Image (spheres, rainbow, N blue to C red):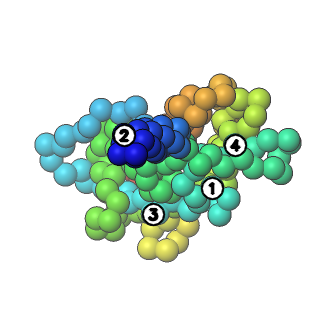
Amino acid sequence: MNHLLRHTTVFLALLTLLLTACGRSAPTHFYLLDSGQPPLTADSLPAASLSIAPVSVPDYLDRNGLVRRSDGQTRLEVSELDIWAEPLGQGARRVLGEVLAARLLPRGIDVIAAGDRQGDMELAVALERLDGDTPGTARLQARWQLSRGGEALDRGIYAASEDAGMSSASLVAAQSRLLQGLGEHLAERLLPRLKAGR
């Protein structure tokens, strides 16, 4: 009887261990957008400054999981395992800030980090789209406005797309490149206004 009880206990322990091992879920992957810019150092403060307002993101994108469109334009797939490591709006603001700083600081324009003091001028960006689709294309559409003291000085719309492949890692890399392209476009477009506003 004691021998049977010992074997039953060992069997139940092994069965519990086996069921616990089989019950693991797939690992969650966290992603960050990448500006592709090396860190900057400044020897002196530039004569003019630009602050970047918090980037607005539509509700359908304002979630943890990566978003892809499927079956045309109306059905969304939101990943439960491939998620952003930071809120998408904050990541977009960080990337735009790094790209703009790399382009504008050498030309005498300081790009103020998030949460710091207000700049001479402010850039507001509203993402209307930053997602992928099932054929493997990443798409970005954004509106932007440059203002000083609440008065709009310039505004525009930017749209771009890029092949992204079907993996989440390749989608995030393509989205990073699209945001980098937006930052480069904005630097070129805003530089004359920023220099004139000093």
Left/right placement of residue 13 relative to residue 168 reads left
Mark 2 or 1, closer to the camera: 2
Q: What secondary structure is marked by label 2?
A: helix
Percent across and percent down for residue 127 are: 61, 54
Which tag, 4 or 2, sits closer to the chain's start?
A: 2
Mark whose residue sits in front, 4 or 2: 2
- Label 3 and label 1: CA atoms lie apart by 18 Å
Query: Which amino acid type is marked by label 1?
Result: Leu
34 in relation to 51, above or below: above
Tell me the quadrant of the picture where the C terminus can be found: bottom left
Q: Earlier in the sequence, mark 3 or mark 2?
A: 2
SS assignment at label 4: strand
Q: Nearer the viewer, residue 55 or 75?
A: 75
Q: Amino acid at mark 2?
A: His
> Measured from the top left, where is residue 117 in percent x and y?
28, 67
Q: Give the Cα separation between the discs numbered 3 and 2.
A: 73 Å
Task: Give residue 68's mark.
Answer: 4
| Distance from the alpha carbon under mark 4 to that under mark 2 | 58 Å
Q: Is residue 40 left or right of residue 165?
A: left
Q: Residues within 10 Å of mark 3 (few under 14, many from 20)?
A: some
Residue 89 rendering spot, x and y as whole percentages: 50, 57
The quadrant in which residue 197 appears is: bottom left
In the rendered structure, are the residues bearing label 4 and label 2 in contact, judged by CB atoms less than 8 Å apart? no
The residue to which callout 2 is attached is 3
Mark 3, residue position:
53
Which amino acid does the dot numbered 3 rest on? Ala
Closest to the camera, between mark 4 and mark 3, is: 4
Residue behind mark 1: 61
Image-quadrant location for residue 101: top left
Labels 4 and 3: the sequence-earlier one? 3
75 vs 179: above or below: below
Circles 1 and 4 in contact, beta carbons < 8 Å:
no
